[in-house]
Image (cartoon, rainbow, N blue to C red):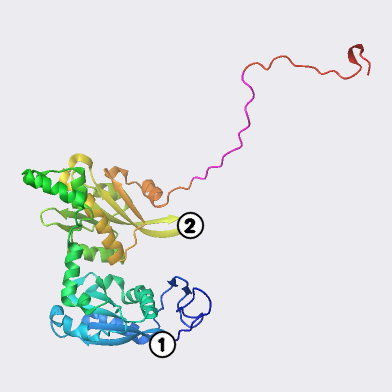
Amino acid sequence: MGFLLREGKGNENLPAAGVCSVSCCRAGFEEPIPISTTELRDFFAKARNGSVRLIKVIIEEEQLVLGAHKELARRWDVDYDAFVLPLLDEQQPCYVLYRLDSQNAQGYEWLFISWSPDNSPVRLKMLYAATRATVKKEFGGGHIKDEMFGTVKEDVSLSGYQKHVSSCSAPAPLTAAEQELQQIRINEGEVAQVKTEISVESKHQTLQGLAFPLQLDAQQAIQALKQKKINYIQLKLDLERETIDLVHTSPTDISDLPKRIPQDSARYHFFLYKHSHEGDYLESVVFIYSMPGYKCSIKERMLYSSCKSRLLDTVEQEFCLEIAKKIEIDDGAELTAEFLYDEVHPKQHAFKQAFAKPKGPVGKRGQKRLIKGPGENGEDS
């Protein structure tokens, strides 16, 4: 691996300066090794098209290189154990990218496995841990659906992956106090009442981070907005099917925005705001969440509020669409050109505190007192 040992306390087992392309410190690696092999980059591009089932990546001579690969054969779950497990060395860490059969807006989804067996040297474990983010970035984070870390083969087998998926989707475990309260309610015959009871706390726990899937036409519209083929998207929640649907993508100017806001229902809007700022021409994507107050039902207000953050995470992370400003309104009349400009480019107020001259005494100052010099009033000097 090209490591040298430094002399001195606290520097044991660290790579010497100039030997590895990673910056090192007493606590470990600060920066990951960049991918430098053209072969691996080219193979990543080929694999993302969907013709490859598995990619094994290893570090050799301070470079990330292609260790092995497998072509498509059968369904992903049928081939999983036969393809993945034989490639895992009991002494050598590696990365494994395994193509699933599901797809998102960017193409096929992949499982990213970080293999770091207990018997491998500590130095290798640190090196592979520091390089994990670089591999994901080079491959394309938007293609990776799930990520697993394993030290024994059972952790990353098909059954291990299925357990991982189940644990991620399971609700958070109850605390001891919550378990005791739940048992009391069951013993008192209040189960039915608990299921129908609605409170601020229960809504927060139930709906926090709620994610409705984007329909295909909505995904295509977001891609078109990113490519600046359209300048406006309106989305709505289908409360029955629990999906996010596309309403329309009509061309929209700033003057048209107020008319796009429904008076009796909530909506999500994405608007490509074209304007000039300090002499520069800018095209900024603005997200607008419109909620016309109490004209909507409680359920609708709760669901729109809960789905908003997950929708924005999906748009920014999976579609890589940068959102310059997120705005919440209850009336379309608020959306004027001046309002949008001030939201995207808030004014910077610089306050400079002037020197405050001390105030004089309040009221009359009294009689002035004269101090006479020597020799005055007939006195000897």
One can see residue 112 in this view: yes
Q: Which quarter of the picture shows residue 155?
A: bottom left
Residue depicted at x 90% and y 15%: 376
Local crowd at mark 2 within 10 Å, few (<14), some, or many (≥20)? Answer: few
Tell me whether the residue at label 1 lies in contact with that at label 2, contact meaning CB atoms closer than 8 angstroms. no
Q: Is residue 295 above or below residue 51?
A: above
Give the prevailing secondary structure in the magenta stretch.
loop
Magenta segment: 349-362
Residue 240 pos. (x, y %): 10, 54
Which residue carries the number 2 mark?
279
Residue 192 pos. (x, y %): 6, 45
Local crowd at mark 1 within 10 Å, few (<14), some, or many (≥20)? Answer: few
Question: Which amino acid lies under the numbered mark 1 shown in the image of this protein?
Answer: Glu
Whether 361 is among the magenta residues is yes
Nearer to the camera, 174 or 321? 174
Question: Which amino acid lies under the numbered mark 2 shown in the image of this protein?
Answer: Gly
Label 1 sits on a secondary structure element that is: loop
Give the left or right position of residue 174, taking residue 334 as reference.
left
Which residue carries the number 1 mark?
61
Q: Is residue 136 above or below residue 279?
A: below
Nearer to the camera, 192 or 313? 192
Whether 360 is among the magenta residues is yes
Q: Earlier in the sequence, mark 1 or mark 2?
A: 1
Residue 124 pos. (x, y %): 37, 80
Label 2 sits on a secondary structure element that is: loop
